[in-house]
Image: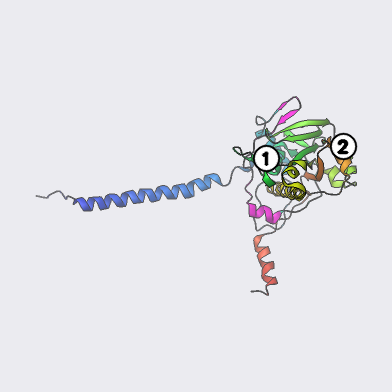
Amino acid sequence: MLRRARLKPLTALWVLTIIITALLTAYAAWLFYGTSHLRSPVSTATSPATTPATSTEHTTGSNTSTATTVATSTRAEYSITGNTVYLPLPRQVSNVTVEEAILWRRSLREYKDEPLTLTQLSMILWAAQGITDPTRRFRAAPSAGATYPLVLYVVVGDRGVLLEPGKYLRAGVYRYDVMKHALTKVREGDLREELAKASLNQPWVRDAPVDLVMCAVFERTTRVYGERGIRYVYMEAGHAAQNVYLMATALGLGTVVVGAFHDDWVASVVKAGKDEAPLYVIPVGVPKALRYPSFQEIGNWYSSQRGGK
């Protein structure tokens, strides 16, 4: 007669330990691999698709259909109350890595006759000065002593920003409200031509569907750091402008920073406050062409400079 096998207490404890260890290992693997896949590529319905790093040439002929997709998805994500435009809330809209954005960033001055979408404009403004820490109200660009001297205006051309299919943001000048992530209308009408004249007739200022005008209230920083605060303001403007470049690159858009302009004239175009000094005019548009170098290409060039080592 067969007897039932019985596990000794120590053997049973050993088997149980193995089972628990296996379960914990499987759970940890799921957390590491499973959730990372959930976090990474977000749907690109709101932005142009990521271009492979091995690509060398790319044209943006698909941006029109992409813009339509964005507008449809953002219909319920924005609202307009009086002179205030509440922008779509910031979110991940691109699969482009920071390494790729740095690699592909260029100053682009030739744009198609196509609008930006409201989502694209929303993300560019957020990248420049948006809130990234609600508790301490820190912003996307670093600021000396968190004094935040920068003020952003947006000059929107006729049919320059697509809200949804067949509907566009009214042309005019808008001021970016950092705390509400909203635009407040300052002036009516398409003022790109006047802004271009104030910018020494640089045609890309006129041709871009949208121009950002970055101003600064120097006193916000100099009252803390004295005269040295002036250089801190210029540093901050550079940080914010680079963020615009990188976000535009990630969205398949083109931009260029413009520093040659008549200060008083630009200030009058956007109706800047008396204490707000213009620092940059930044056209943003759908570029006629983009080139995407690969890291392999860059690596080969570095190797050639090292004598093939």
Q: Which mark is residue 268?
A: 2
**Image quarter of residue 217:** top right
Q: Earlier in the sequence, mark 1 or mark 2?
A: 1
Viewer-proximal residue among 305 and 287: 305
Q: Residue at x 76, y 39 (%)?
A: 152
- Please provide the residue range marked out in magenta: 80-104
Q: Which mark is residue 86?
A: none
Q: Is residue 226 magenta?
A: no
Viewer-proximal residue among 174 and 207: 174
Viewer-proximal residue among 56 and 273: 273
Q: CA distance from mark 1 to mark 2?
A: 25 Å
Residue 181 in view, yes or no: yes
Q: Residue reaching furthest top?
A: 82
SS for callout 2: helix
Identify which amino acid the numbered label 2 is placed on. Answer: Ser
The residue that mark 1 highlights is 130
Quadrant for the C terminus, please: bottom right
Up the image or down, 51 lies above or below 273; here it is: below
Q: Residue reaching furthest left?
A: 1
